[in-house]
Amino acid sequence: MNIRRISSGGAFEQKVGYCRAVVAGGFVHVAGTVGQGNDVVSQCRSALEIIAAALDEAGASFADVVRVTYMLPDRAEFEPCWPVLVAAFGENPPAATMIECGLIDPKYRIEIEVTALLPA
């Protein structure tokens, strides 16, 4: 099996020892991604931009995402993100899970992880 690793150059990639995405077995596995910004909605948008770049480099898009996991330290902050998520996934909503948990740094309000099927 061919495996391709995609790095976004994020600070934690080198510190923790991971890459932004791995292309393997016809899928793109994008690591949990946090974004920049002062609130959960701006961080959500930023994380989705980083994810979109990784998917694009792999040859996929949000239309190809089959699974998404949202992680937030406060589940009450999830609802304000819904319009941003609907705009990103549009007519192709993936299976989804939301988990309330601690993130790597308290300044982060949302982390998003996706799996996409590579287009044939």
Image: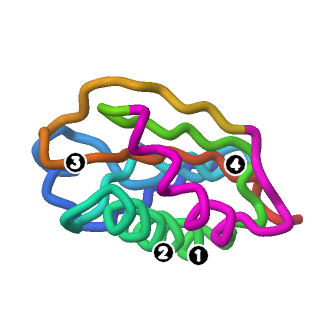
Labels 2 and 3: the sequence-earlier one: 2
Q: Residues within 10 Å of mark 3 (few under 14, many from 20)?
A: many
Q: Residue at x 38, y 55 (%)?
A: 20
**Label 1: element kind:** helix
Magenta segment range?
75-95
Question: Mark 2 is on which residue type?
Answer: Ala
Q: What residue is pinned by disc 3?
A: 108
Q: Depth check: give the residue in front, 79 or 60.
A: 79
Rounded to the nearest angstrom, the CA distance separating label 3 from label 4 is 27 Å
Q: Are marks 1 and 2 in contact (CB under 8 Å)?
A: yes
Magenta span has 33? no
In the foreground, 16 or 82: 82
Q: Position of residue 109 (x, y in %)?
A: 28, 46
Q: In whole angstroms, how far apart are the C-alphas of marks 3 and 1?
A: 24 Å
Q: Is residue 22 above or below residue 120?
A: above
Q: Could you tell me the amino acid type at mark 1?
A: Asp
Name the element at disc 2. Answer: helix
Residue denoted by label 1: 56
Q: Which residue is mark 4?
A: 27
Mark 3 vs 4, N-terminal side: 4
Residue 119 is left or right of residue 6, and the answer is: right
85 left or right of 93 in image: left
Location of the C terminus by quadrant is bottom right
Query: Can you identify the residue that label 2 sits on?
Result: 53
Query: How busy is the neighbourhood of tag 2: few (under 14 within 10 Å), some, or many (20 plus)?
Result: some
